[in-house]
Amino acid sequence: MEIAVVTEGIEPERLARQPWCFFRDRLASDGIQIRMFQASEPAAFEQPFDAMMLYAWQDWRNRRLFDPYRIMPVMEQMAAYRSAFPETVQIILNHTDMSRRPYATPFWRTGDPVLYRTPAYDRNVLAPFPVESIWAFEQVWGSDTFRSTDSVKHKAGFIGRPSGAKGNRKEVARFTSKAGIGHCGRKLRYSKARHDRIMSRCQIVVCPRGWGEQSQRHWDAWLSGKPVLTDRDCDSVEMIPGIRLREEEHYLVFDEPDQIPDLVREWTDPSRAAELKQIGKNGREAALFHDAYGRIRTFFKQAVGDSSAI
């Protein structure tokens, strides 16, 4: 099986975290050959493959990454390719951080399988993509970098950069600071090592949305067994593919930033210590349950109609 992945304007470090790249050698040993092309390479559009997937930035609200002058020629090439090689399965990749919106629709035709990052649990809101065509995936990232046996220093913590809705993360940091440590600025005041050390001594890690609901902070906290306090938007999407996360079981949820201090005080009360510890444990187990390789392998097999070894 040969799958062509055509990229345009994707940073190498972002590309490396995608499961089809991260597990490229392992997929090859399982009979799934990933052929990587830049959109500028003629060879990408001169031959048929079992499947093709375009990885190009699509979120036009993120002006730092979206460049319409680069995207439009690729759309033209893809349309011509589909006409020349209709037997090649076109996999639609909706990868953007603003994951609630199906940005990849310009490349989609009815019947195309859709690989969707952090889809809403209610797949109906992702129309026009049909519910049965959507397959959830996530980048391969996160580690147990917040784990520590040291005593708790802060009841809660959030240190990050402003992104997403204007002012939202600054408000999250401001209210988190009333119950622990909170800081949000374009220039981080701590090195990554220092940041991780601070988070390791927080009883709860506050994880607000940024450009999208998903973040490495969530995964670092989950894998470290830290209780996560996240926002309602994050609670409505499939952050760990294949798992239905639930409030007060896998994480805590706030609706508005001003609720953070009261929620932290409530859940760090000694009387709730066992419950809070269990939430951290459940989050870790859910993150560890995610089989990024197995999911992408299964998806590719299904996408090209190969039911063997699924």
Image (cartoon, helix red, strand yellow):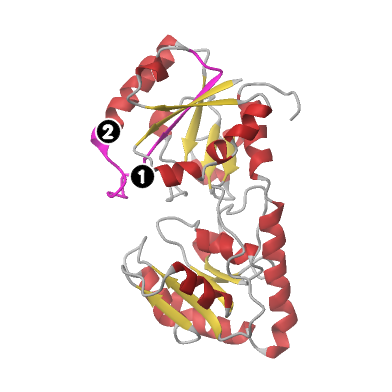
> Gap in Å between the C-alphas at discs 2 and 1?
13 Å
Quadrant that contains the N terminus? top right
Which circle marks residue 88 in the picture?
A: none
**What segment is highlighted magenta in the picture?**
48-69
Q: Main secondary structure of the magenta part?
A: loop
| Rendering coords of residue 246 (x, y %) | 66, 62
Mark 2 residue element: helix
Q: Please, is residue 200 above or below residue 8 in the view?
A: below
Disc 2 target residue: 70
Amino acid under label 2?
Arg
Q: Please, is residue 168 above or below residue 63 in the view?
A: below
Verify whether residue 55 appears in magenta: yes
Residue 95 visible in the current orientation: no
Residue drawn at the location 51% of the way across and 35% of the way down: 129
**Which of these two is toward me, 214 or 23?**
23
Residue drawn at the location 53% of the way across and 68% of the way down: 230
Verify whether residue 59 appears in magenta: yes
| Rendering coords of residue 52 (x, y %) | 49, 24
Answer few, some or many: residues within 10 Å of disc 1's Cα (few below 14, many 20 plus, some between 14 and 19).
many
* Residue 170 position by quadrant: bottom left
Quadrant that contains the C terminus? top right
| Rendering coords of residue 233 (x, y %) | 50, 61
Residue drawn at the location 56% of the way across and 44% of the way down: 123
Mark 1 residue element: loop
* Residue 133 position by quadrant: top right
Residue 112 visible in the current orientation: yes
**Which of these two is toward me, 165 or 122?**
165
Amino acid under label 1?
Asp
Disc 1 target residue: 59
User: Mark 2 touching mark 1, by CB under 8 A?
Assistant: no
Q: Is residue 171 left or right of residue 222?
A: left
Answer few, some or many: residues within 10 Å of disc 2's Cα (few below 14, many 20 plus, some between 14 and 19).
some
